[in-house]
Image (tube, rainbow, N blue to C red):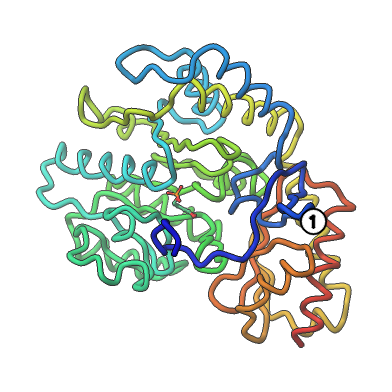
Amino acid sequence: MSALMQTYARLPVTFSHGEGVYLYDTDGRRYLDAIAGIAVNGLGHAHPAVTAAICAQANKLVHTSNLYRIEAQEQLGETLTRIAGMDNCFFGNSGAEANEAAIKIARLYGHQRKIDKPAIVVLEGAFHGRTLATLSATGNRKIQAGFEPLVTGFIRAPRNDIHALRQIAAHNPGVVAVLVEPIQGESGVHPLTAEYLQAVREICDEHEWLLMLDEVQTGNGRTGSYFAYQGMDLVPDVVTTAKGLGNGLPIGACLARGAAAQVFGGGQHGSTYGGNPLVCATALAVVKTIVEDKLCANATAMGDVIRERLLCDDAVAASIAEIRGRGLMLGIQLKTECADLAQRALEAGLLINVTAGNTVRLLPALIIEQQEAEAIADSLAQLIRETA
Ligand SMILES: Cc1ncc(COP(=O)(O)O)c(C=O)c1O
């Protein structure tokens, strides 16, 4: 019996090492990695800039705690806030923690405005994490079941429905914020439209609510701009991110601007490991590489390569109901259930993920080149033909 709690349904493979967009299992077999640690390894595996940053920092200093100033944390904070157009940020260790910080900011912001029971609007189909507050914000009963009583103070709205949000605004004076993913990842890659998000921004402005974007999965270049909102002509008040920021080292960030940036006071939030020298020095190297190597543009170009190549095969195109997403965050919804496809892809040497029973999710590394993007599409096309 395994000594591990049985919380994951794992595929029967163990990897020993990786290089670029490839992983190698303990028998030496090579796999084309189209999932990149669930949108984490944006720079692929064993990227020299990441390895160099980890080794150099590990040789100097790994951890000091936030009792002291941390140079790499300050530099990373400056870099990220400049890219995001935010004023300041807080570092934790995961996406859920980044969202916890955002939720706490929204509640404090509400209390500072004399709202006793501040509420946050969240969407159907959302995924915000597995801590109690973030699973309560998540719009999936399977993730919540058994953990009641849930954290209160969330109001659920349908996605891309601005009329519903206006109704909520009219009937709920306690609302202080809206928390949404620009593209919902876990529920099957469902984008919010730019028009919807711009209208949400307007409603937030009208009511002095905070617009909080969960860019844990969409951030760090994945959708073709550093953050997804940067392609949408709007600026949120709070942005959270994690995953691709550390390329595998655990880090999460909650960035804020304006009133939201002034909410936390001394002692109101904290994390022992959050933003330690090792993860911040590594994340700095990651962010620098994403920007200098123009990986956002590459994400757009390679995403297009995968889409076009899949759709140019008539038999494959006929099996596809819809391709959703942007850049290298793609959801390919098939017309039939395909829950076993991740296992069959593994056997064929391709790593993918299936969400919502019928949607293949591709999240390959942002460094992917044309030939590798074509290989992902060709391998997936073959599997889809076999499914049909
Ligand atoms: C949009 C979004 N928010 C939050 C999370 C939770 O992040 P973590 O697993 O790092 O806590 C995820 C993870 O998949 C996510 O996709």
Residue 360: x percent and y percent? Answer: 65, 70
180 sits to left or right of 59: left
Which secondary structure, mark 1? Answer: loop
111 sits to left or right of 218: left
Residue 333: x percent and y percent? Answer: 65, 75
- Residue 187 drawn above or below residue 178: below
Residue 276: x percent and y percent? Answer: 44, 24
Asked whether mark 1 and ligand 1 are closer than 8 Å, the reply comes as no
Q: Residue at x 47, y 23 (%)?
A: 77
Tell me where residue 384 sits by quadrant: bottom right
Q: Residue at x 23, y 64 (%)?
A: 170
Q: Hey, what amino acid is under mark 1?
A: Arg
Residue closer to the observer: 278 or 58: 58
Q: Residue at x 76, y 88 (%)?
A: 388
Q: Residue at x 54, y 11 (%)?
A: 60
What residue did someone put label 1 on?
29
Residue closer to the observer: 129 or 204: 129
Label total for image: 1
Residue closer to the observer: 367 or 350: 350
Tell me where residue 112 sits by quadrant: top left
- Residue 302 drawn above or below residue 6: above
Residue 29: x percent and y percent? Answer: 79, 56
Placement of the N terminus among the 4 image quadrants: bottom left
- Residue 323 drawn above or below residue 362: below
350 sits to left or right of 66: right
